[in-house]
Structure formats: C-alpha cells, structure tokens
Image (spheres, rainbow, N blue to C red):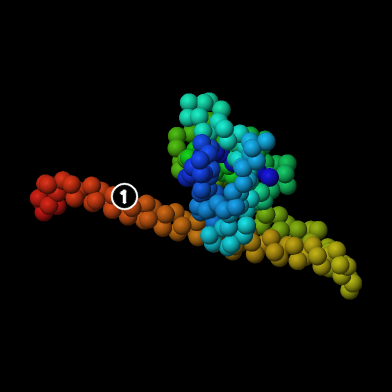
Amino acid sequence: MKQLDISCIKRWVAKGSSKLSQPASIGISCPECSLRGVFTTKRRYYDEYRDTLSCSADCPACGVQVHFWVKDLIGQSDKDSEHQPTLYMSPAMDSHLDLSKLPDSVPANVVQFCSSTQDVYQTGNLTATSVLAQSTLDALFTEFLPVGNSRTNLAKLITESISSIELDRPLINLATSLRNDGNLKELLDSGQHTSPETADALMQLLEHLITYIYVMPEEFKKLDKQFAELNRVTNLARRNLDSSSDVDDPDADEKQAA
Ligand SMILES: [Zn+2]
C-alpha cells in the first residue's frame, strides 16, 4: 500500500443525496506498466463507520486493476477545513532503482536526493519530481567537481566533472586483470576444468561489458530523443493555444500578414 498526494484525484463527484464527494478519476503511474494515465474509478463504496471510501480502477493501457482508499473524506466536504483526506493505493508502484542495493561508494547525500525524488514521483507530485530531479543531478556531479572549480550551471558542472568520474576505469582494470600476472589471466590459464562458479563469473563479465559498452550509451541516446519529442509536443500544444487565443483578436490577421 502506498500513500499518494491527494492532488492525484483529478475529478470529484457528488454521490446521491450525500454531501460527500467521491473520487471519479485519479491520475497516477500504473504499478504494472508504469504508463501515466487517468484512472476512472468504479465500485465506489463508502464505509461511514471508518470515514473511508474504497474504489477500484483499471489501467487504461494494460488493464491491470488498482485499488484505492480515501481516508477522512468528511474533511473534503468542508472546503474551509484544513483537514485533508489521505489517499492510498495498492499495489504500490515498483521503485525504478533499488536504492538499498547501491554500492557503498555512492555518497549518502546522493542516495538521499534519489530517495526523496522517488518518493515524490510515486506520490504523483510531478512538479516536485522535476525540481528534485534537478537537485539530484546537481548533487551527483558536484561530488566529482575538481577542488577549486566553482559550479555555475549543470552543463558546465557535468563537463568539468567528467575527468574525475573515470568512466574508462573498468576497462583499464579489465586489461590489467588480463595481463600475465592478472587475476583473470590466471583463472583462464588455470587448467582444463572450468567450475560452475568460474563460468558464471565469466558470463557476468560479458553481460556487464555489453551493458556498459553498448546498452547504456544507447539508453542515453533514446532518452535524448524522448526529450526532443516531449519538447515538440509541448511546443505544438503551446502554439495551438496561442493561435486559438488569436481568434478573439481582431488584429490577428494583420499581425500575421506583417
Ligand atoms: Zn498499466
């Protein structure tokens, strides 16, 4: 069960003669397919004794059923009340990155920023997610900024950190391990019999190398294409909005012609 930001409820409806409003649609990321969408609620049931409303909804993309609970609904009916209802959902969304499995070399403040960003993302607070994602990027690269360099903007911060990150370190270590006195060379030369553990370790090496050399760079390229597409859609929507507001402007045609 995961608590969500109450603003995830996009539409409230009044139910019968009751003064209490009920959530009709909820905007969340699907716990199954991760697609962000508006879930239309059904089978809404209000439990008066516990002031809790339960309802369900199907993901518009993958069809998986998600359940919701809104606690303390009476607060919602009184607009002046500071008392806000709380919203819960089950099943909870999976974390994108399991922060509990990160190596010890990741600085504590970077883990903290990542964790806070994940939390607000999962509650559906998208503006806070964007703000925290930028702070996390900042914290991540500040760790690598050479001493004496002052940070200005994210682009410059990353550029100046590249030399300290030593992205080629794994390949340098692999080459060292394959030298005559290296660990991997010794293992490969050790004899006829390959143990299951050795075969498994070699498979892991191959998987990590392919991911590191080919998969990860490709994933970053895909993300940049996605950023471009998101900008294109946003700019198009903005232009449509501008042109529809021009309709009311009698000078619009003249302005365009000029
Ligand atoms: Zn889904």
Kindly state the secondary structure of the residue where label 1 is placed.
Answer: helix
Above-or-below relation of 144 to 195: above
Q: Would residue 58 be visible to someone looking at this image?
A: yes
Relative to 204, 32 lies left or right: left
Q: Is mark 1 within 8 Å of ligand 1?
A: no
Q: Would residue 167 be visible to someone looking at this image?
A: no
Above-or-below relation of 244 to 50: below
Relative to 172, 27 lies left or right: left
Q: How many marks?
A: 1
Find disc 1 in the rendering and name its residue: 238
**Which image quadrant is residue 206 in?**
bottom right
The residue lying furthest to the bottom in this view is 192
Question: What's the residue at 50%, 29% (across, down)?
Answer: 78
Residue 141, image x, y percentages:
56, 40
The image quadrant where one finds the N terminus is: top right
Above-or-below relation of 185 to 237: below
**Which image quadrant is residue 175 in?**
bottom right
Relative to 105, 18 lies left or right: left
Residue 118, image x, y percentages:
60, 43
Question: What's the residue at 73%, 41% (across, down)?
Answer: 104
- Relative depth, front residue between 177 and 136: 136
Residue 192, image x, y percentages:
89, 74
Question: What's the residue at 58%, 58% (across, down)?
Answer: 58
Question: What's the residue at 51%, 44% (across, down)?
Answer: 16
- Relative depth, front residue between 61 and 148: 61
> Are there few (<14), some (14-19), or many (20+) residues within 10 Å of tag 1?
few
Residue 226, image x, y percentages:
46, 57
Q: Disc 1 residue type?
A: Arg
